[in-house]
Image (spheres, rainbow, N blue to C red):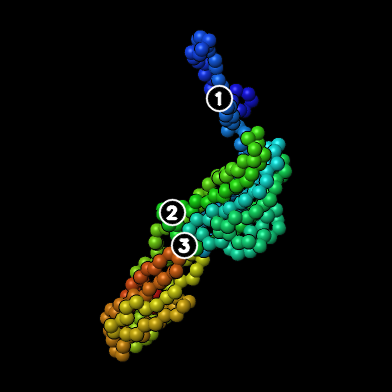
Amino acid sequence: NTGNSYTNSVNVTYEYQSASGENSANITSNSIVTYSPSIIIKPTLNLAANLTFVVLGDTITFTATITNNTSTLINNAIFRAEIPTGLSYIAGTLTINGTPYPTSPPNVDIDLGAMNPSDSFTIKYSATAASPPTTGSTYSNFFTLTYTFNSPAGVLTNTLTSNTVNITTNTVTINPLTVKNIIYRTYKNISLEEKIIAGNISKNSISYSIQTSPSNGYASINQTGTFKYTPKVNFLGTDTFSILLSNSDIGSTTLNISVVVTEFPDSLTNLNYCKK
């Protein structure tokens, strides 16, 4: 054992009979040198992201840092960003030490060339949360670096994997709205017009449509969330219909509307257009 290498050989001593009598001899095999893992030089890799939780449509910026903190020249350094299914690389966002790089990931080998001792690369790129993760609720992101270097055993090739950055998302389909079934009041032969107040947790807009039509009137809704209900002529009683609120990211919900149609009051003090 010398330094970071092990030299192994076999020595055989034997006896044999010849014309001159009994003799002895020995023979030694060729030597095999085995090197310890300490000859593998390892630059420092680190991956970071600006977000740890996303909803669909969010943009994530990744920063990969590679530093040759060894005393050995690294050659043929190849960077590869492993972007998982569900994240979509945004074309044109890849930079190396602040300079735009023409090749676009995901999962493309990028030649960084040689790295002298103390050299460092900062690689930035962005991706959009385009669809849910293939399993669970986590996008797992990392990168690899493949490189060559001179060692006591000759030119060696090694591949390192960075730390893993996990970004979680809500994969449960939830109603995008804070709404509840509502009862409105109007009067015979008087139309009702109201706006639905909805809290949208996604960046994409909500679309509105009549899901089931009223039996004793007519209903419509526009894409600002304002609906109009007109009772049939002389109808009195309770009419119902439903509105479908949809969001391309996080699903849909149904809002049930009830409209109580009463006689017009005898005096103005009894007017009531408020919803319950």
| Tag 3 residue | 131
Between residue 54 and residue 64, name the one nearer to us.
64
Can the viewer see residue 212 in this picture? yes
Q: Earlier in the sequence, mark 1 or mark 3?
A: 1
The three-letter amino acid code for the residue at tag 3 is Ser
- Where is residue 241 shown, x and y percent of the image? 32, 77
Q: Are marks 1 and 3 in contact (CB under 8 Å)?
A: no
Please give the label number shown on residue 37. none
Residue at 31 percent across and 88 percent down: it is 232
Q: Earlier in the sequence, mark 3 or mark 2?
A: 3
The three-letter amino acid code for the residue at tag 1 is Ser
Distance, label 2 to label 1, CA atoms, is 59 Å
Please give the label number shown on residue 137. 2
The reply, left or right, for residue 115 in relation to residue 32 is right
Q: Earlier in the sequence, mark 2 or mark 1?
A: 1
Pointer 3: residues within 10 angstroms few (<14), some, or many (20+)?
some
Residue at 67 percent across and 52 percent down: it is 112
Residue at 46 percent across and 52 percent down: it is 138
Please give the label number shown on residue 29. 1
Above or below residue 91? Residue 44 is above
Image quarter for residue 1? Answer: top right
